[in-house]
Amino acid sequence: MGRSRQGSKHKSRLTGCAAPIWRNASTISFSQAVRDFQSGTRTPRQFLEGCLKTIAAREPVVKAFVTFNIEASRAVADEATARYRAGQPLSMVDGCPVGIKDIIDTCDLPTQMGSRIYDGWQPRFDAACVQALRKGGAVIVGKTVCPEFACSGGGGATTNPHDPARTPGGSSSGSAAAVGAGMLPVALGTQTGGSTLRPASYCGAFGFKPTHGVLAMAGVHPISATHDHLGVIGGTLDDTWRVASHISLAVGSAGKPCLSGAGADVPPARRPRRLIRLYTKGWAEVDAATREVFDAIGEDLARLGIEIVSGETDRGIAQLEAVLDGGFVERSVDITAYDMKWPYEQYVARHGEVVAKRIHDRIAKAKTMTPDYYQGLLAEKAAIREQWRQAARGADAFVTLASSGAAPVGLEYTGSRTFLNYATFLGVPAFSLPLMSVAGLPVGLQLIGLDGQDGALCAIAHWLMRELGAG
């Protein structure tokens, strides 16, 4: 099988758009289907059966799932069908088929985390995010593939839905591939480095990593409490925002505010006045074709009257870029290593022969770190976060790539996460928008904002997709 032809040049709302725009013909939309459910022209059961038909056709090659819950999902979809017929849907996600990354607990499906330690392990309770989805009537179709504890660094069996010779990205590989293949409208992922936005970029889907802590992580196997985020991957911005909003409003997150702007409808499109283009060291990894398409996006934005500023013209932005590239990312890996002492120190001690080398290395590093060194890292992180806020003054958002190019060939290497680390380590919200087509494959445009301003960032994402997207 060769690469998909779905990413050919597609005209956006901007007449004469310079950039080749990605278009995924496989995308399905739950938000659009809801209108059919309400009018009675289609039912949640019929929508689910469409997903299952696509799964049957594409799963043998894509290999996005670990386990399925097909008969139970049909029963839940039938219950949703009855509620819509009665005009009484439970919530904004009632009847929505969802995939759950296999480090997130589910009471009726094993949570094996890609680890031999947890082979066949069955939680008794749902994670908070799954509880929220079930209470709202969402249809849990199955668990999606991830590498060992979502942090081993390796790939897996899942293939890219647009070229099976390429990686789907990691670690939310199964979730992104299932959405990119049109098997599901939405799936849950997680991100500690780049594990939601990078696979979304490679698979031509929307990826959303909210402000740190806004979506509850209870019941999600930990890597780093200071950096773990629950993420959402969707075929449309509407579905991505709808699911994130429901989780936030239905279950909350201890000690954190709800997702700003949360609601069933995506925030109204807002035209940005000024965007900051980040020139960080990840650009050294970017091939000429990807750079050309990204530059063309910038040209299109300029034609729409958007001011693009960078460190070339703004001293504060240049200083921020120097700090971000001055070893900060590497030291932030030390933060995650220290956070991993529980439970990974026990995993290494008791099951070291089946635990990935990367985990061994992180625990070995953590044992050399003192509490004072760790506290110093957290203080430095807080200072850089404030510098990020200062650099953003007068601008609406930061813009860069969501990956260093199209998905690499091969399944073992899941791609560079250089472009993703900054927003993750700073805990600020970010989207990967499936806007760019590079040699017929998707590459995401990353839009990054300020912590606690997720709704405002989504409004800009809405505008960008409306004006530039394949819509």
Image (spheres, rainbow, N blue to C red):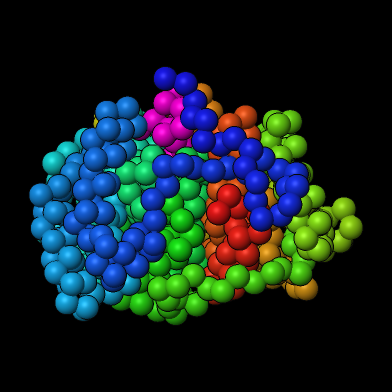
First to last magenta residue range = 158-172
Magenta stretch prevailing secondary structure? loop
336, above or below 243, in the image: above
Query: Is 448 in the magenta?
Result: no
Q: What residue is drawn where x is 15% and y is 48%?
A: 69
Q: Is residue 115 left or right of residue 439?
A: left
Closer to the camera in the image, 319 or 276: 276
The image quarter in which residue 316 lies? bottom right
Q: Is residue 108 left or right of residue 295?
A: left
At horizontal 71% and vertical 68% (from top left) the residue drawn is 272
Question: Is 183 placed above or below 446 here?
Answer: above
Q: Is residue 77 visible?
A: yes
Q: Quadrant of the N terminus?
A: top left
Q: Is residue 343 visible?
A: no
Give above or below for 347 relative to 82. Answer: above
The part of the image, by quadrant, that contains residue 282 is top right
Residue drawn at x 81%, y 63% as measured from the top left? 305
Q: Which quadrant, please, contains the C terminus?
A: bottom right
Residue 222: percent from left, percent from top: 34, 55
Query: As rendered, which of 223 and 276 lies closer to the eye?
Result: 276
The image shows residue 326, relative to residue 448, as above or below, that is above
Q: Position of residue 140 (x, y in %)?
A: 22, 55
Q: Is residue 165 magenta?
A: yes
Q: Residue at 33% of width from left, 49% of height from top?
A: 184
Residue 46 percent location from the top left of the image? 21, 54
Q: Nearer the viewer, residue 388 or 374?
A: 388
In x, y percent, where is residue 47? 26, 54
